[in-house]
Amino acid sequence: MFAGDATPLTTKEATRLAVGPELDARAWLCLRGWVGTSLRINIDDPNDPVPYWLFSTRQPNDVARVIADAREELTRRGRARVKGSLRD
């Protein structure tokens, strides 16, 4: 699982800063000029030069919550597999 923390950018100003002075040129972007809010997802893959994804969304908090829930579920399932394996 290489998707790291998700950071909602809930204002036009926060998104403007993220795509302007704070932008890392290696980042993956999918932006729509008519959508003022966005979401940044850090990438935790040491073999991937992309540090984060930044994309427009009208519901950045909702998308961040769904990603956090999915990460939690994958972690829970991973623990369940390890408990049932030969490592016990």
Image (cartoon, rainbow, N blue to C red):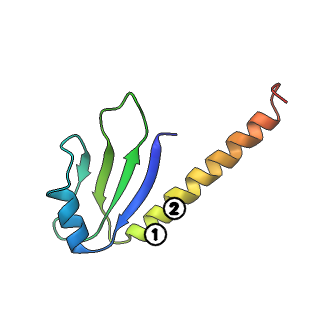
Q: Quadrant of the C terminus?
A: top right
- Quadrant of the rendered image containing residue 58: bottom left
Q: Amino acid at mark 1?
A: Asp
Q: Which residue is mark 2?
A: 66
**What residue is shown at x 21% (from left), y 46% (from top)?**
24
Q: Are marks 1 and 2 in contact (CB under 8 Å)?
A: yes
Asked if residue 24 is positioned above or below residue 22 in the image, the reply reads above
**What residue is shown at x 23% (from left), y 65% (from top)?**
15
Label 1: element kind: helix
Residue 5 left/right relative to 78:
left
Task: Tell me the crowding category of disc 2: few under 14, some 14 to 19, or many 20 or more residues within 10 angstroms, Cα based.
Answer: few
Closer to us: 56 or 86: 86
Q: How many marks?
A: 2
Asked if residue 53 is positioned above or below residue 26 in the image, the reply reads below
Closer to us: 49 or 63: 49
Closer to us: 49 or 60: 49
The x and y percentages for residue 43 are: 39, 43
**What residue is shown at x 58% (from left), y 59% (from top)?**
69
Marks 1 and 2, how far apart in space? 6 Å
Closer to us: 71 or 33: 71
Q: Amino acid at mark 2?
A: Val
**What residue is shown at x 52% (from left), y 40% (from top)?**
1
Q: Which residue is mark 1?
A: 62
